[in-house]
Each structure stands twice: as structure tokens, then as C-alpha cells.
Image (tube, helix red, strand yellow):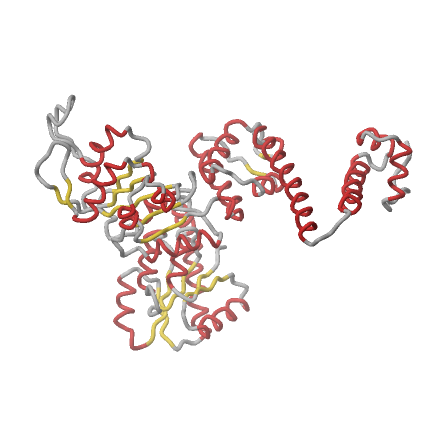
């Protein structure tokens, strides 16, 4: 069973409910504000929500509204002071399960939570169905920061610049910003400015009049017009040609544009969200991106972390993508062993979430069994991992040498050399089960040389046999 969420800015209220739920062995999770709860709501569904109505930041009513959008059957208990009865009425109108007047009797509160839990368990199939299609997955602190920003921008029309490496999910975040904005009922239009030839990009963005150029047999509305009232997502904005940067700046400055070949200004009622994997400040210094356009776009900056900065999310994402691929292909979902999960969690994934999703699709198609071990992973991934490990220990050794030199130490061969030999011999003996002849052959040493080094290095020469 999923936890009960307690949301109240009053620490004493949270403490009382936490103690009561602990006595009843009911799992719970506490939040000091609705903003914190909203940031996690898209990633996981609680069993029941118990929330105050008036808190700094977003109100309990906003939390109720969002919870009901995501999980219509989720019971939400609203806590309110007697002076907030009008708010309680609003809570019921918003779909609250019940309201709990303050100050409350703890036993009464527990009884109410138990009833809500029973109701939630009966409807759990519906909750799971809604939960199966999350917007963006992530439990790592870096992703929680992203969720908080999305929540804070939910009533904003501000221009947003999303930065992050390729494959981090910038369009997903842009789409989420749109869905949680006042423009949610209007179009969300996305265009990758790097994927469209320069000669066509202007027409794609702003449209063209009939006869504007060879082949323009009909008038065409551009992406700005298609997104009227909604959101236009400009992906890879750092690659936009300089002349189009000027036209985009003009639109952002006065809200008007012209179709190609047109003479009548068109009003752009569009929220622009831009994204790039490049460092725009560097592009500005290089003269490749207009500084004034950068400042127009950089109203709100939202950085998406690469997957290597949120490794704790890899098991969650892998499970989700394996289930998704299985549904699409109509097969049983594959399961990663603990060893395979540990292996994947240690990878850097330069292609980020997109690379992990592609890997899970490959495993769904190519892995022979349902249970996936390290040997079932793509050969190139295992080879890359081995190369990375080799680079890492060499880098660590180089760093240790540098540290020793910086400390003014001398005779490093006499200090580090024996440590290196000890590691080699210990591992070789472990590999052969203590058989020194085999270990000597693997190391390229004579048996007598190995025996002498074992004694010199203080290794246990009595382990294993001499065969």
C-alpha cells in the first residue's frame, strides 16, 4: 500500500499525525508545503492525502485540484480552521473526500484516514491505471527541483529557457510546462530548429503567402500561428541562423510578425519555451548568438540534469521503459536482476534518458529470457564499461601520484610500486583459488619469483595449495 501524505506548514500538526499513523503501522510521507507535494505528485501517487488548506505558497485547494486531475479516485482530506468554512465548501466542490476541522481529535482524524484508505484500496485499480502514464519520472533531488519549478510556473506565461544535454527530456518538460499553464487548453507546437534547413525554417516559423517564392502555390500558416493562444517550443535554439534570430527577437519584443512575402502584421499570442544543449553564453561571446535574444529567452532558466547526476532514478526509469516496451510489443515485461541494475546504475549514459529508453527497447526485443543478467546486456555497453573502468583506475593512479608530488613526497616507486604488485598478486591468487603456479602463469612470473614476492609483500603464503 502506498503512503498517506500529510501536508501542513505547522510542524506540530505533522508531528501529531505522524505519531498516530506510526502507532497504527500506516506508512506516511510529510510535506511542509503544497509546493513540495505538488513537485512529487506527478512522479508518484499517495494512497490518501491529508492537507491543510492555507499555507505559504500554493494552497491546499490547488493541491486538491491537481491531485484530482492526475488521480480522480484519490481521497483527499482537507484540514481547515472553523473560520475557513467557506474554504471547506470550496473543497467539497473541488472533490474533497472529507474535511477535518482544526483543532481536531486525533482518534477522529485516524478514523477518517482509515475510511479514506479503505475507499482508496477499493478504487486502487483506477489509481494504478492513472499512475501508469506518468509525465516525467524522477525521485532524485535534482529532478525534484525541476518538478518544483514546473509547479511554481503553473500560473505563469513567462518565457522559459530549458538547458541540458541531448536526451535529458527537454521536450517532455516543455510539454509539462504547457499542460500545467493557463494555456493548457490551447495548442502545444514543437519545432526542432536544427533539423530544418535554413531556407525552410523561416517559412516553418512564420508561414508564407501564396506566391512568396517558387513552389508557394497556397498560403501557409507557420508555427507561430498554429500555436496561437498556446505554447511554441523551439528546440535546439542555439543552432538558429542569425537572420532568423533577428526576426524571433522582433516577435518577442513587440509580439508581431509577418508571413514570408506578407505585408500585414500578425499578432503572436504565444508563449515561447526554448531549449538547447549548448552553452548560450559561450555562443554569445563567439558572436554566434545574439546577446539581446539570449536575454529575452533567459527569463526563467531551467536546467535538466544528465542521467549520471541522478543515478538513483535509473532503476525506476528502466522498470518503466521495460514495461512500456512490453506493452507496445504485446509481450511479457523483462526484469533486470540486481546485478544488472547495479551495472546499469554505474554507467554514465552519455545519451541520457533517451539512451536508457532505447536500451530497454533493445532488451525487450533481443534478450532471450524474462530475467536479464549482465551477460544479456548489449556487448558494446559491456565493452564501453570495461574501457571506462580501465580509464578510471589509471586516472585514479595518476591523481594519487599528483597528490603525492604536491605533498613533496619522494621515492614514489618504492611506495606505490609494492602496493600495485600486491593488488595484482592478491587478485590473481583469488582468481585461481590460491594456486600459485596458475597465478604465476597468469601474471607472467616464475613460481619462485611469485613465492618471494608473496613473502616480501606480507601476503599469506599458506592460503591455497601449491599445485
Name the one closer to the observer, 163 or 133.
163
Q: Position of residue 158 (x, y in %)?
A: 27, 53
Residue beneath the point at 31% across and 55% down: 153
- Count of picture labels: 0
Question: Left or right: where does residue 97 sit relative to residue 5?
Answer: left
Q: Position of residue 325 (x, y in %)?
A: 45, 34
Question: Left or right: where does residue 97 sit relative to residue 258?
Answer: right
Above or below, comparing residue 69 to residue 449 in the picture: below
Q: Position of residue 399 (x, y in %)?
A: 65, 46
Name the one closer to the observer, 83 or 428.
428
Look at the image and tell me in which quarter the C terminus lies: top right
Quadrant of residue 368 within the rendered picture: top right
Above or below, comparing residue 157 to residue 322 in the picture: below
Q: Position of residue 9 (x, y in %)?
A: 40, 70
Residue beneath the point at 28% across and 60% down: 94
Residue at the left extreme of this rendering: 264
Question: Left or right: where does residue 419 sit relative to residue 153?
Answer: right
Above or below, comparing residue 111 to residue 357 in the picture: below
Quadrant of residue 386 within the rendered picture: top right
Residue at the top extreme of this rendering: 215
Question: Left or right: where does residue 409 sit relative to residue 68?
Answer: right
Amino acid at each position: 500500500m502506498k503512503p498517506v501524505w500529510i501536508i501542513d506548514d505547522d510542524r506540530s500538526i505533522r508531528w501529531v499525525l505522524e505519531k498516530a499513523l506510526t502507532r497504527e503501522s500506516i506508512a506516511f510521507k510529510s510535506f511542509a508545503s503544497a509546493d513540495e507535494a505538488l513537485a512529487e505528485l506527478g512522479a508518484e501517487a499517495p494512497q490518501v492525502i491529508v492537507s491543510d488548506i492555507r499555507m505559504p505558497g500554493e494552497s491546499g485547494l490547488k493541491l486538491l485540484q491537481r491531485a484530482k486531475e492526475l488521480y480522480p479516485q484519490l481521497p483527499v482530506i482537507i484540514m481547515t480552521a472553523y473560520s475557513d468554512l467557506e474554504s471547506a465548501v470550496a473543497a467539497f466542490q473541488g472533490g474533497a473526500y472529507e474535511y477535518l476541522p482544526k483543532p481536531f481529535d486525533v482518534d477522529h482524524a485516524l478514523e477518517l484516514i482509515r475510511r479514506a484508505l479503505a475507499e482508496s484500496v477499493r478504487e486502487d485499480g483506477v489509481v494504478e491505471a492513472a499512475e501508469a502514464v506518468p509525465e516525467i519520472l524522477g525521485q532524485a533531488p535534482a529532478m525534484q527541483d525541476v518538478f518544483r519549478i514546473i509547479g511554481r510556473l503553473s500560473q505563469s506565461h513567462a518565457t522559459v529557457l530549458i538547458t541540458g544535454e541531448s536526451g535529458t527530456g527537454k521536450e517532455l518538460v516543455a510539454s509539462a510546462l504547457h499542460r500545467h499553464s493557463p494555456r493548457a487548453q490551447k495548442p502545444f507546437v514543437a519545432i526542432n530548429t536544427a533539423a530544418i534547413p535554413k531556407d525552410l525554417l523561416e517559412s516553418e516559423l512564420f508561414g508564407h503567402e501564396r506566391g512568396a517564392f517558387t513552389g508557394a502555390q497556397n498560403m501557409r500558416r507557420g508555427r507561430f500561428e498554429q500555436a496561437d493562444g498556446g505554447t511554441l517550443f523551439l528546440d535546439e535554439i542555439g543552432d538558429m541562423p542569425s537572420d532568423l534570430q533577428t526576426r524571433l527577437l522582433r516577435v518577442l519584443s513587440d509580439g508581431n510578425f509577418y508571413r514570408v512575402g506578407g505585408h500585414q502584421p500578425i499578432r503572436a499570442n504565444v508563449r515561447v519555451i526554448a531549449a538547447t544543449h549548448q552553452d548560450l553564453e559561450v555562443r554569445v561571446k563567439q558572436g554566434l548568438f545574439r546577446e539581446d535574444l539570449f536575454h529575452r529567452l533567459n527569463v526563467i532558466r531551467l536546467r535538466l540534469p544528465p542521467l549520471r547526476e541522478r543515478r538513483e532514478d535509473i532503476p525506476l526509469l528502466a522498470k518503466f521503459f521495460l514495461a512500456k516496451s512490453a506493452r507496445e510489443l504485446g509481450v511479457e515485461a523483462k526484469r533486470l536482476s540486481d546485478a544488472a541494475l547495479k551495472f546499469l546504475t554505474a554507467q554514465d549514459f552519455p545519451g541520457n534518458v533517451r539512451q536508457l529508453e532505447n536500451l530497454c527497447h533493445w532488451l525487450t526485443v533481443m534478450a532471450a529470457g524474462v530475467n536479464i543478467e549482465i551477460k544479456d546486456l548489449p556487448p558494446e555497453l559491456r565493452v564501453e564499461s570495461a574501457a571506462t573502468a580501465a580509464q578510471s583506475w589509471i586516472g585514479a593512479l595518476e591523481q594519487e601520484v599528483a597528490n603525492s608530488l604536491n605533498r613533496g613526497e619522494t621515492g614514489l616507486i618504492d611506495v606505490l610500486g609494492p602496493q600495485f604488485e600486491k593488488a595484482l598478486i592478491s587478485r590473481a591468487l583469488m582468481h585461481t583459488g590460491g594456486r600459485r603456479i596458475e597465478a604465476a602463469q597468469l601474471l607472467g612470473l616464475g613460481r619462485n619469483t611469485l613465492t618471494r614476492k608473496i613473502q616480501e609483500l606480507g601476503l599469506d603464503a599458506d592460503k591455497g595449495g601449491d599445485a
